[in-house]
Image (tube, helix red, strand yellow):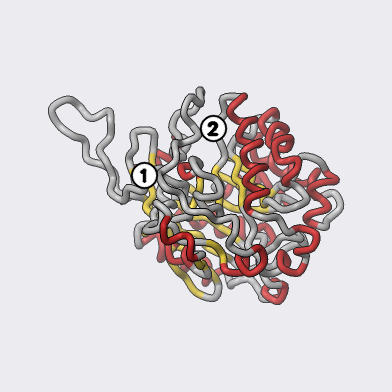
Amino acid sequence: MARTAATGRTAATSRSDAPKGRRAAAPRPARVHELFLGYACNERCLFCSQEFAWRREPFVPFEDAARRAWTAYQGGARVLVVNGGEPTLYADLERLVALARKTGYPEVHIQTNGLRLADREYAAALRRAGLTLARFSIHGHTPELHDAQVQVPGAFEKAWAGLENLRSLGAAVGINVVLNRLNAPTLAESCAWFLERGVGDIGFIFPLYEGDMAVYARRTALSMTDAAAAVRRAFSEFRARRAEPPFMLNFTPCVLPGYEGRTLRWSGDAAALYDGAQTLLIDPASYRLDRPEGGKGLADSAAENKAKPEACASCVYAPRCLGVERRYLERFGPGEFRPLASVPAPVHRGWRGVRSWRRVLNPRETAALRGAP
């Protein structure tokens, strides 16, 4: 998943380590291809934005998935993100990962609930095939909290076992937390638990009010303002530990002013990824979402089903901000979205121990992306 840039620049800058007297050529931004295999899943998350009927559709045939991955590579993609539904239910996942690596992808990622990865042999098979990173959907720090949200007894223990399996096998791991009424009150405690166990790559996702999230809204609905309060408390945990702060998705700057540098997709350019030298590594225009029903660019996807309250016209970010999900506005109204008179000061000032407020890649990913044609 592409991360955000604080300034929204869309042209690469030169590296800061260029020899004196001449500027090193900046690498071309890497292309990311996110391949959705289908929507079948072995959890029943209360906040899932997918329609239940979609989960009955079959996964794409292996030949189709392989062709899409190959075509994307030929077009310049160098990071393949395999998504679902739940990609570990795909019978040919190991084969697809191996093919992608053999094709030339230096990075192959999955986004997973982790249930099947509790089987160490299965985790090892994916790692041998060439899996480099897995982002686990873990929505709390206790079995009771997580299992209640995904409606599968024992899910927390399996997900954490899966994370430990892949981490011990040398793969990178991260955690995505979907915020809702059940887990927001203890978000800071959950983050502290994750950090204490050595997992610092964490993302907060504000839910979309569609699919099961709409069905179970009476149990899960959370205003963006209340979610923002939970986010601020959680950021305090990261700051106290001098840890890299989380990234966020589906928030607007007016609800979390000063957090723009960690918020994805609030504007058309807020999906770019820079390294510590402020060199553009991933451009939003080069990030492709490849779904069974058709593909589209990340920027186009981010702008879908958004609307702006009338007050937004006077906001300093009016030319850039994409607005708010329409279904959210229908449920909560526009009152919490108040225009900003000026660009807020970034909350990272004085935050020790963070390499860059802009989201940066690990060294292996940086090397892979810099090698992209």
Is 308 in front, or is 234? 308
Q: Residue 30 at x, y = what percent? A: 37, 50
Which amino acid lies under the numbered mark 1 shown in the image of this protein?
Thr
Is 275 in front, or is 336? 336
Question: Few, some or many C-alpha atoms within 10 Å of disc 2 (few <14, some 14-19, many ≥20)?
Answer: many
- Badges 1 and 2: C-beta atoms under 8 Å apart? no
Instruction: Say if 266 sits above or below 346 in the image.
Output: below
Q: Is residue 73 left or right of residue 145?
A: left
Residue at image coords 50%, 68%: 304
Question: Few, some or many C-alpha atoms within 10 Å of disc 1 (few <14, some 14-19, many ≥20)?
Answer: few
Q: Is residue 237 left or right of residue 13?
A: right
Mark 1 vs mark 2: which is more N-terminal? 1
Residue that carries the numbered disc 1 in the rendered image: 7
Asked if one can make out residue 337 in the rendered structure from this viewpoint, the answer is: yes
Res 293 → quadrant: bottom right
Residue that carries the numbered disc 2 in the rendered image: 244
Which amino acid lies under the numbered mark 2 shown in the image of this protein?
Glu
Instruction: Say if 146 sits above or below 360 in the image.
Output: below
Residue at image coords 44%, 57%: 321
Q: How far apart are marks 1 and 2 (CA)?
A: 19 Å
Residue at image coords 67%, 42%: 230
Is 309 in front, or is 86? 309
Give SS at disc 2.
Answer: loop
Res 168 → quadrant: top right
Give SS at disc 1.
Answer: loop
Q: Residue 93 at x, y = what percent? A: 61, 59
